[in-house]
Image (cartoon, rainbow, N blue to C red):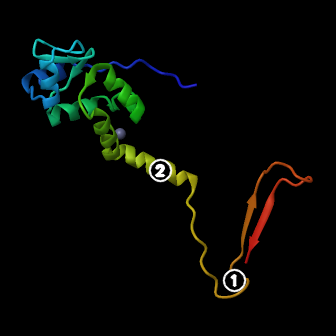
Amino acid sequence: MMLRRKITVNKSDIVKEIKRNNTREQEVVQALKKEDRLIWEEHGIVHMEGRIYVSNNKKTREKILKKNHDLVDMGHLGQQRMLELIKQNYWWPESKENIRKYMQECFKCQQNKVQHQKKVGELHPLEIPQGPWQGISIDIIGPLSRSNRIDAIVVIID
Ligand SMILES: [Zn+2]
C-alpha cells in the first residue's frame, strides 16, 4: 500500500503571472465566445471546468511544471502524481504532453533512472573463444516448478 500525503502548492504568484501575460490559444478564445458553461472568464482569469487556464506563455507553464514536480520536502514526483496535482488546479492544451517532456528532460530524474537500471545488472554477450575450454560459463536457472523432484537447470557452455 502506498501512503499518500495531501500536497498543496501555492498558486497566488502563478495567478498574478497569468493575469500579466494573458496570451490565449485560438481554441480557448473560440470556446469563450461560444459561452459554453464549461469555460468562463472572471477577473482576467479563464476557468475551464473549475480549473485555471494557464495562458500561452512558456515561462509560466514551465514554472507550474517545476513547482508541481520538484517539491522541496518530497523530492521529485513521478509523471502520474505530477499530472494529478496539476489537474487539480490548472488546465491548458497539451499539458499532458508538456509534463511527459518535462520529466524526460529533468536531469535528476534521468540520473535516478540510470542508477536504478544499473542495479538490475546488465547483460553482456560472451566473447567468442579461440578454441575449446577457453571460456566456460555456467548458468543456474531456478527455482522452477518441480518436475520429477527437479526444480533447477544448470547450463554449462564451453
Ligand atoms: Zn525530476
Could you tell me which secondary element the residue under label 2 belongs to?
Answer: helix
Which quadrant of the structure image shows residue 31?
A: top left
Mark pair 2, 1: CA separation: 33 Å
Identify the residue at the far front of this view: 34
Residue at image location 33% in from the left, 20% down from the top: 88
Instruction: Report the amino acid beneath label 1.
Output: Gln
Q: Which part of the image, by quadrant, shows the N terminus?
A: top right
Determine which residue is flagged by label 1.
134
Do the CB atoms of the residues marked 2 and 1 lie less than 8 Å apart? no
Could you tell me which secondary element the residue under label 1 belongs to?
Answer: loop
Q: Nearer the viewer, residue 156 or 96?
A: 96
Determine which residue is flagged by label 2.
115
Relative to residue 26, is residue 130 depicted above or below? below
Which quadrant of the structure image shows residue 90?
A: top left
Relative to residue 104, is residue 2 depicted above or below? above
Instruction: Report the amino acid beneath label 2.
Output: Gln
Residue at image location 40% in from the left, 49% down from the top: 111
